[in-house]
Image (cartoon, coloured by chain):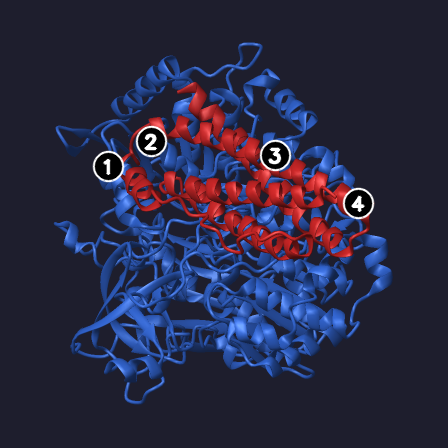
Amino acid sequence: MSFSRDRIAEPWGTRTPYGPGRSWPQRVDQYLADGLDPGSVDRWVQSASILHSNGDALDIAVKDNEIVGVRGRGVDRVNRGRLGPKDLFGWQANASPDRLTRPLIRQNGELVETDWDTAMDRIVTRSRELLDEQGPSAIGFYTSGQLFLEEYYTLGVIAHGAIGTNHVDGNTRLCTATAAEALKESFGCDGQPGSYTDVDHADVIALFGHNVAETQTVLWARILDRLAGPNPPAIVCVDPRPTPVADHAAVHLAPLPGTNVALMNGLLHEIVANDWVDREWIDRHTVGFEELRTQLAPYTPEKVAVTCDVPADDLREAGRLLGTTDRLLSTVLQGFYQSHQATAAAVQVNNLHLIRGMLGKPGCGVLQMNGQPTAQNTRECGADGDLAGFRNWANDAHIAELAKLWNVETDKIPHYGPPTHAMQMFRYAEQGSLKMLWVSATNPAVSMPELARIRSILSQDRLFLVVQDIFRTETTELADVVLPAAAWGEKTGTFTNADRTVHLSDKAVDPPGQARPDLDIFLDYARRMDFRDKDGDPLPSWHDAASAFEAWKQCSAGRPCDYTGLSYDRLRGESGIQWPCTTEHPDGTERLYTDGRFFSTPDYCESYGKDLVTGAPLEPTEYRALNPDGRAIIKAAEYMRPHEEPGEDHPFALITGRTLYHFHTRTKTGRVPQLNAAAPQVWVEISPQDALQQGIMDGDVLAISSPRGILHAQARITGIRPGVLFIPFHYGYWDSNPTAAADHDRAANELTVTDWDPASKQPIFKTAAAAVTRVRAGDGPAPAPTATAAAPVGPGIAPTAGGSAAAVTETRPPIGEDDR
Amino acid sequence: MKLGLAIRELHRSERKLALDLTSLASRHKTDHEIHHTASDLAVWSQDHVRELAQVGHAYGLDLKDEPRTEARTGPMQEKLSELLGRRPEPALILLMDLRHLHRVAAGVSLDWELLAQGAQATRDPVLMTMTTRCHPQTLRQLRWANAMLKVLAPQVLTT
């Protein structure tokens, strides 16, 4: 049975309802270039989605050595054939005529085309100079959440093992650092406890700052199908915006930005006060409950209602739902991770499950979500301010393991402190002690907070900036050397989604011009630098994706993220498999912690934890004194006021975020006709009350300012909570050609504050103060989509649609056939 | 009874710690984590000062509830920090300031130890509760100064 659907207008596609405990029915989504008949496709090449973290398995259609479309993989556990709008249409960006096809170097102030030898020679010469003059601390690497596992592991080994610098991080710092930190704080180690299949069993699904309908559309489709089936789950939504999730919620809590810890403490208070806790489970599997109980005492619903400005009765009702269900699934994302007290708030969600004993069972899971497709790999491979294989920088035995794997001296690997996080690396560059920064597959000149500062750091003459990407971006324009990289579909590798599912992504077509896979670029650098191990053999010792994967398997052996049971052959043909995957568990592991034993044993854990307020790491002795030995750690946290609150000059709380149709800084999605048309320009969301007070109509051009800068955007009047403004962060300047400083008036990050969570070091994008001025009437409605959280409250605005250009074929197998 | 002396001394040293934390925040405004966390941690010491002043009444003391804990030169220090934001020198000054802070916080911690011992000996329940609540926060301030020193020192000392 096949239907055609406009998947710009209906991002989640057709419902396939199912009941609790049943398996999610298949629905295979397919989009091929104009009028192409599936029969004429030359070959289908296995991969997964690269424009969000859900890890939806797909096959790439190839005809005449060009990518011509995609089709979801019905057999895959993650998506059962479904794809989101960004997956269905996003592949078209690969063939953009403005791809980078040759290296560029800066000559007399201009970037000019050159060959690989010249470009690499410049990087190698500068690296050698800096290593001679200052040593490893002069060099830093800032990578991504969009490369492949093999590339991160290689980069991590080059940085930590061959150069010996402590300065390696990813843009995962901006999206997923708090997920990792919250897992480390509660369970001693990174590693997603739950599984997407918990959606199939849950009776209550609580989404904390997680607008899943826009960030992981296929996961939301799964939830929508449960909601459309028998015995649907109740939804609890915490979000200041009127998201599609909020529309379906039994309780929607819209707290003031920056008050998440107070809100969570209020909910936990309600659960403890009503004794909805599992005492036996707490006693057997956790430490720290009494301290939590003490800490929670002042957080009565009445008091929290005032702090967060939410109704006390709604808090009680949410507490009742969370406290009395037998199958609770919680998910967390940027509303918590990018807000004030990020880690402390995310840890309280873990605590909710720990005090209710709801982990490791069907329908009882926590999903500390990721934002980017391969963020999990940045974390596990040691390219994001962690060490490879979730090893603990403060545990000498773990460092010795790495030294043995890489065959280098132990003291070559920096472990005198936590690996340097991105915000600190940029500070070192600002002060001039970090003199070379190599950026791969990310665009800090749009994605980092307080862009005027970031631009001024990156454009310093004394900083040697290398940028490796598939397009020219706002960041490449500040670089000394630009390296053209192969994109997804043009190289082979693996990556892992937010529920630990590993997919293989095979090469479908050749990269354009002289563009090369990121892995080849890193290995080329290592060879030209002549990095050697203790025995004089090349370091890293591998030479391609397959050999890098085998090396990674050895590194992962015995660690929580054990890949030893996986191989390219195994992943090819089959579909996604969840780590840990070993000879004992050859089919992978659906849920962690099924036996209530955690990775927290001092000799095994990834981290001894941190003080959630100061960020100070615990000493090994302090950690041992907690006696966590295999038990989870319940960490309490007090609410503290945000550092920048609305006031007289800047009366609004500003939050930034994303829209369903775009990814990151739009370098790909902005080049895709269907996606670009759905959200072509920046906008600002404002509540009807605030709009009325300021005489603002939908579509009016507003000037939004903060102590850092100003930007202009058309107003969209939505059901966002009064006093709050929302601006999507995707829009930079690559397609607006700013010529003067005053033209930097589109990116949301012109306004954001330089401040980060002390524990996870994740920058805060959702707690800043801003002012609004109406400039003039607009030429039409705001360029914002209508099927999402940006939905207008007023009438007369045409719904977002993609028309025939967005027609996607959805195929259901005959009834009964996929109903396992 | 010398308990009043101990309270007075702790009130003085906590005020000094609050003042040092707010000064640190101002002097290193462009080291954003130092700036924000030091400001947050100063609030703990300000709270301690207030509680000590209140508890002091029972011991015949007249201590100030809210003495000045912001450096008079704060705004100037912030401006200077911004002007020097690109210079390498403040990195070394930051290490010196953290080292100083650590020593002050260690002194405050010892003062809390003394007061706790006295409170136990006199079995003053108000004092005992207060030391149990406040002293751990001092220890967290102390560990923070230590941790930031350890994190920042390698880069500063090798460049």
Left or right relative to A215: residue A768: left
Separation of disc 4 and disc 1 at Cα? Answer: 48 Å
Q: Is residue A748 above or below residue A483?
A: below
Same chain shared by disc 3 and disc 1: no
Separation of disc 2 and disc 4 at Cα? Answer: 43 Å
CB within 8 Å, label 2 to label 4: no
Left or right relative to A159: residue A392: right
- Mark drawn on residue A459: 1
Q: Is residue A613 above or below residue A149?
A: below
Q: Mark 1, residues whose alpha carbon is within 10 Å: few (<14), some, or many (≥20)?
A: some
Q: Tell which tag, 4 or 3, sits nearer the viewer.
A: 3
Left or right relative to A746: residue A801: right
| Residue at the spot of label 4 | A630
Chain letter of the blue region: A
| Residue at the spot of label 3 | B107
Q: Mark 2, residues whose alpha carbon is within 10 Å: few (<14), some, or many (≥20)?
A: some
| Residue at the spot of label 2 | A431
Q: Disc 4 is attached to a residue of which chain? A: A
Separation of disc 3 and disc 1 at Cα? Answer: 44 Å
Chain letter of the red region: B
